[in-house]
Image (cartoon, rainbow, N blue to C red):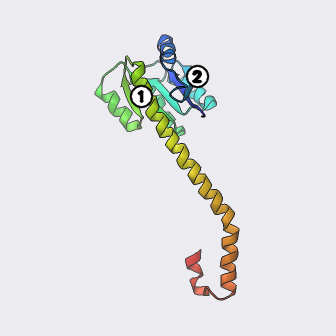
Amino acid sequence: MDLYRIILVDDEEEVRKSIIRKIDWQAVGFTVVGDAENGEDALEKIENLEPDVVLTDIRMPYMDGLAMSRKLKEQYPNIKIIIFSGFDEFEYAKEAIDIEVEQYLLKPVNAEELGRVFSRIREMLDHERDEQRNIDKLNQYYLESLPLLQESFYTSLIEGRVQPDEVERYL
């Protein structure tokens, strides 16, 4: 099983280390590929590390988690974002919903809750991967079938089974 990639973003190093230690990441289908102390640092790392999920705090210096999340959704719309915050403020939650983050958690976050969240995110990512594989297979089948379909169409046209005024319907 391929593990999904995650980056942790929080201005407190001890919080990042604690989260990394709290979870059996492989058991929930993830690997932590990096961490960052603010949104600017995270955006640079995300470009190189290509994570599937970003777990971020809201309040950080230089670029906060909400501003970073907005940029991520513009540049990488498939990245899943989980925000955790020590602030139970409605405006933060409302903005997170507007950005379409997957989850908004309040600190302190316990390991059991994080495990459930990441299990749900893994299921979502698995489903998206399966859908993409199906689309890729259909595209491949279409491309492989196209020459035969074209040949059949041209043969029907030449043999008069398709009238010239009906050609528009087939194109």
Name which residue type carries label 2. Answer: Gly
Quadrant where the image shows the C terminus? bottom right
Q: Nearer the viewer, residue 7 or 65?
A: 7
Q: Quadrant of residue 164?
A: bottom right
Q: Are marks 1 and 2 in contact (CB under 8 Å)?
A: no
Q: Quadrant of residue 89?
A: top left
Q: Between marks 1 and 2, how big is the CA–CA gap?
A: 21 Å
Quadrant where the image shows the N terminus? top right
Residue 146 position within the rendered picture, expressed as x and y whole percent measured from the top left: 67, 67
Q: Nearer the viewer, residue 22 or 92?
A: 22
Q: Earlier in the sequence, mark 1 or mark 2?
A: 2
Which dot marks residue 12?
none
The residue depicted at 53 percent of the width and 49 percent of the height is: 131
The residue depicted at 33 percent of the width and 33 percent of the height is: 94
Name which residue type carries label 1. Answer: Arg
Q: Is residue 64 visible?
A: no
Which dot marks residue 116?
1
**On screen, 46 above or below 142?**
above
